[in-house]
Image (cartoon, helix red, strand yellow):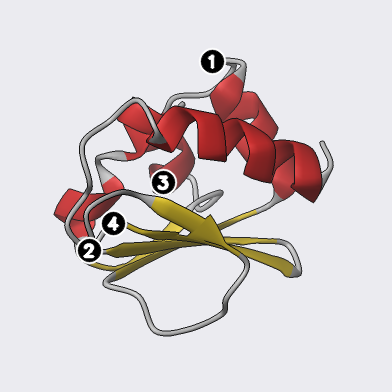
Protein backbone atom coordinates (compact mmCIF):
# COMPACT_ATOMS: atom_id res chain seq x y z
CA UNK A 1 0.00 0.00 0.00
CA UNK A 2 1.43 3.37 -1.02
CA UNK A 3 1.60 6.29 1.41
CA UNK A 4 -0.31 8.66 -0.89
CA UNK A 5 -3.22 6.21 -1.08
CA UNK A 6 -3.19 5.88 2.72
CA UNK A 7 -3.19 9.69 3.13
CA UNK A 8 -6.12 10.07 0.72
CA UNK A 9 -8.16 7.38 2.48
CA UNK A 10 -7.41 8.84 5.92
CA UNK A 11 -8.31 12.32 4.68
CA UNK A 12 -11.73 11.02 3.61
CA UNK A 13 -12.26 9.12 6.87
CA UNK A 14 -11.33 12.01 9.19
CA UNK A 15 -13.97 14.18 7.52
CA UNK A 16 -16.63 11.74 8.77
CA UNK A 17 -15.79 12.12 12.48
CA UNK A 18 -15.82 15.05 14.88
CA UNK A 19 -12.47 16.75 15.57
CA UNK A 20 -10.45 14.43 17.79
CA UNK A 21 -9.31 17.35 19.96
CA UNK A 22 -5.62 16.43 19.82
CA UNK A 23 -2.81 15.50 17.45
CA UNK A 24 -2.46 11.88 16.35
CA UNK A 25 0.61 10.83 14.39
CA UNK A 26 1.12 7.68 12.36
CA UNK A 27 4.67 6.52 11.65
CA UNK A 28 4.33 4.06 8.77
CA UNK A 29 7.76 2.69 7.92
CA UNK A 30 9.68 5.86 6.93
CA UNK A 31 6.60 8.03 6.34
CA UNK A 32 4.59 10.24 8.70
CA UNK A 33 0.92 11.16 8.68
CA UNK A 34 -0.33 13.70 11.20
CA UNK A 35 -3.99 14.17 12.02
CA UNK A 36 -4.38 17.53 13.74
CA UNK A 37 -7.79 17.54 15.37
CA UNK A 38 -6.93 20.33 17.80
CA UNK A 39 -8.71 22.89 15.63
CA UNK A 40 -12.28 23.10 14.31
CA UNK A 41 -11.75 20.14 11.94
CA UNK A 42 -9.37 17.20 11.51
CA UNK A 43 -6.51 18.16 9.19
CA UNK A 44 -4.12 15.66 7.57
CA UNK A 45 -0.49 16.56 6.86
CA UNK A 46 2.92 14.93 6.57
CA UNK A 47 4.45 17.03 9.35
CA UNK A 48 6.68 15.14 11.75
CA UNK A 49 6.01 17.19 14.87
CA UNK A 50 5.22 16.28 18.47
CA UNK A 51 1.80 14.70 18.85
CA UNK A 52 -0.38 13.66 21.78
CA UNK A 53 -0.19 10.08 20.50
CA UNK A 54 2.14 8.39 18.03
CA UNK A 55 1.21 5.06 16.47
CA UNK A 56 4.06 3.22 14.78
CA UNK A 57 3.56 0.31 12.40
CA UNK A 58 4.49 -0.91 8.94
CA UNK A 59 2.44 -0.05 5.89
CA UNK A 60 1.73 -3.78 5.55
CA UNK A 61 0.23 -3.88 9.05
CA UNK A 62 -1.82 -0.77 8.29
CA UNK A 63 -3.19 -2.51 5.20
CA UNK A 64 -4.10 -5.61 7.23
CA UNK A 65 -5.92 -3.44 9.77
CA UNK A 66 -7.83 -1.73 7.01
CA UNK A 67 -8.82 -5.01 5.39
CA UNK A 68 -9.83 -6.34 8.85
CA UNK A 69 -7.28 -9.16 8.57
CA UNK A 70 -5.91 -8.32 12.02
CA UNK A 71 -7.51 -6.64 15.03
CA UNK A 72 -5.84 -3.56 16.54
CA UNK A 73 -5.55 -5.15 20.00
CA UNK A 74 -3.91 -8.30 18.61
CA UNK A 75 -1.51 -6.20 16.51
CA UNK A 76 -0.58 -4.19 19.60
CA UNK A 77 -0.10 -7.25 21.81
CA UNK A 78 2.10 -8.94 19.20
CA UNK A 79 4.24 -5.81 18.74
CA UNK A 80 3.10 -5.02 15.20
CA UNK A 81 1.75 -1.69 16.50
CA UNK A 82 3.49 0.49 19.04
CA UNK A 83 1.63 3.29 20.80
CA UNK A 84 3.36 6.18 22.54
CA UNK A 85 1.35 8.77 24.43
CA UNK A 86 -2.41 9.05 24.90
CA UNK A 87 -3.75 5.49 24.59
CA UNK A 88 -7.34 6.79 24.62
CA UNK A 89 -6.59 8.74 21.47
CA UNK A 90 -5.12 5.60 19.87
CA UNK A 91 -8.44 3.87 20.43
CA UNK A 92 -10.04 6.34 18.01
CA UNK A 93 -8.13 4.44 15.32
CA UNK A 94 -11.17 2.16 14.95
CA UNK A 95 -13.23 5.15 13.75
CA UNK A 96 -10.68 5.90 11.04
CA UNK A 97 -10.50 2.45 9.51
Q: For mark 4, what is the residue?
A: 37
Kindly report which numbered mark, 4 or 3, lies closer to the viewer in this rendering.
4
Kindly report which numbered mark, 4 or 1, lies closer to the viewer in this rendering.
4
Q: CA distance from mark 1 to mark 2?
A: 26 Å
Q: Position of residue 47 (x, y in %)?
A: 57, 75
For the residues labelled 4 and 2, say whether their Cβ atoms are less than 8 Å apart: yes
Q: For mark 3, what is the residue?
A: 76
Kindly report which numbered mark, 3 or 2, lies closer to the viewer in this rendering.
2
Q: Residue at x 22, y 49 (%)?
A: 20
Q: Classify mark 3: residues with Cα within 10 Å, few (<14), some (14-19) or many (20+).
A: some
Q: Classify mark 1: residues with Cα within 10 Å, few (<14), some (14-19) or many (20+).
A: few
Q: Position of residue 30 (x, y in %)?
A: 76, 69
Q: Classify mark 4: residues with Cα within 10 Å, few (<14), some (14-19) or many (20+).
A: some
Which numbered disc covers residue 68?
1
Which element carries disc 2, helix, strand or loop? loop
Residue at the bottom extreme? 50
Q: Residue at x 15, y 51 (%)?
A: 88
Near-viewer residue (93 or 77)? 93
Q: For mark 2, what is the residue?
A: 22
Nearer-N-terminus badge (4/2): 2
Q: Position of residue 24 (x, y in %)?
A: 36, 61
Amino acid sequence: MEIEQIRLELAENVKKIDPIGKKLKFKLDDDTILIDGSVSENIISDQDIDADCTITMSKATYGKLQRKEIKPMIATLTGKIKVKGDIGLAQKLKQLM
